[in-house]
Image (cartoon, grey):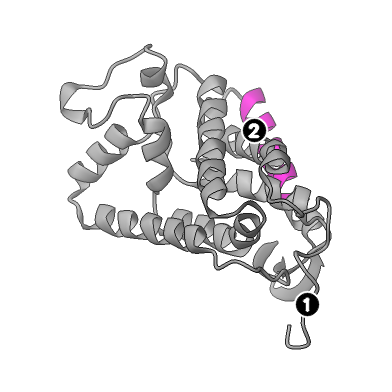
Amino acid sequence: MIPLRDDNPTTLKPIVTIGIVAVCTLVFLWQATLPPADQDRLVHGLGLVPAILFGRAELPPGLVLVPAELSLFTSMFLHAGWLHLIGNMLYLWIFGNNVEDALGHVRFVGFYLACGLAAALAQAWQAPDSTIPMVGASGAIGGVLGAYLVLFPRARVLVLLPLGLFTQVIRVPAIVVLGFWFVLQFLGGFVAGVEGAGAEEGGIAYWAHIGGFAAGAVLVAPLRRRGIGLLKGITRPRGPWG
């Protein structure tokens, strides 16, 4: 189930959402221009390594770029490949504008960073001895999804539904799309834990996604703008031209 867009209009231009997409894209393009050895140094130096964060291991001096605590934030703007970047930015583009609209620009910045922090800590706590660098915006975006679900569970989302050799494009409520996403993360994290896969199974930081989602669902209520309700269909009634 791949979301393509939602039918949920906004009243504010999503300048922060656009800015995050732009920054993540530019950072990745910069990463791609570096030699492989420098790319590896960047991922280890700016990515979150749980064992380094908790003082259970140390990076070689040549790989240290920022204090371990700062990597909780720098890791949010790195990505491991084109599919990783595109998938994250697609979800942020579709759902971030409405959450930004509900919170306002400044609060959305703090909200996004707080969700990313919660996500990183959830993943690090789950595997404190891991030396695998964690990178990507998916934990913070998980917070955006959690907030969207609390705000607009009945908003309609256009999704691409693969059906074997065929595909179908349908509209479904946001609660179905985001609920399905969350269940997949929970099952992935559970299976990884049972199999002793450690911090990441197949390169996916499931507990970061879960932690970010939970943080977003909790934080959105106290941070939303005055007059913005919860558990609604859309931000405002659609006009005659959509």
Q: Position of residue 131 (x, y in %)?
A: 38, 24
- Give the Cα separation between the discs numbered 2 and 1: 39 Å
Q: Is residue 117 above or below residue 153?
A: above
Looking at the image, which is closer to me, 102 or 171?
A: 102
- Pointer 2: what residue? 189
Q: Could you say which quadrant of the image residue 173 lies in? A: bottom right
Q: What residue is drawn where x is 65% and y is 69%?
A: 11
Residue visible at 72% across and 51% down in the picture: 226
Label 2 vs label 1, nearer the camera: 1
Is residue 173 one of those drawn in magenta?
A: no
Instruction: Specify whether 63 is left or right of 190.
Output: left
SS class of the residue under badge 2? helix
Residue topped by disc 1: 238
The quarter of the picture where residue 1 lies is bottom right
Pick the residue in front: 182 or 156. Answer: 156
Q: Nearer the viewer, residue 18 or 130?
A: 18
Determine whether, in the image, residue 50 is placed left or right of residue 87: left
The answer to which of marks 2 and 1 sits earlier in the sequence is: 2
Give the residue displayed 57% in from the left and 38% down from the top: 115
Mark 2 surroundings within 10 Å by alpha-carbon count, few (fewer than 14), some (14 through 19), many (20 or more): many
Q: Is residue 181 magenta?
A: yes
Rendered location of residue 236, percent (x, y): 77, 68
Q: Which residues are magenta?
A: 179-194
Q: Secondary structure at mark 1?
A: loop
Disc 1 residue type (three-letter): Arg
Image quarter of the C terminus: bottom right
- Judge from the rendering whether residue 146 lies leftward or rightward of residue 118; answer left or right: right
Whether residue 201 is visible to the viewer of this picture, yes or no, is no
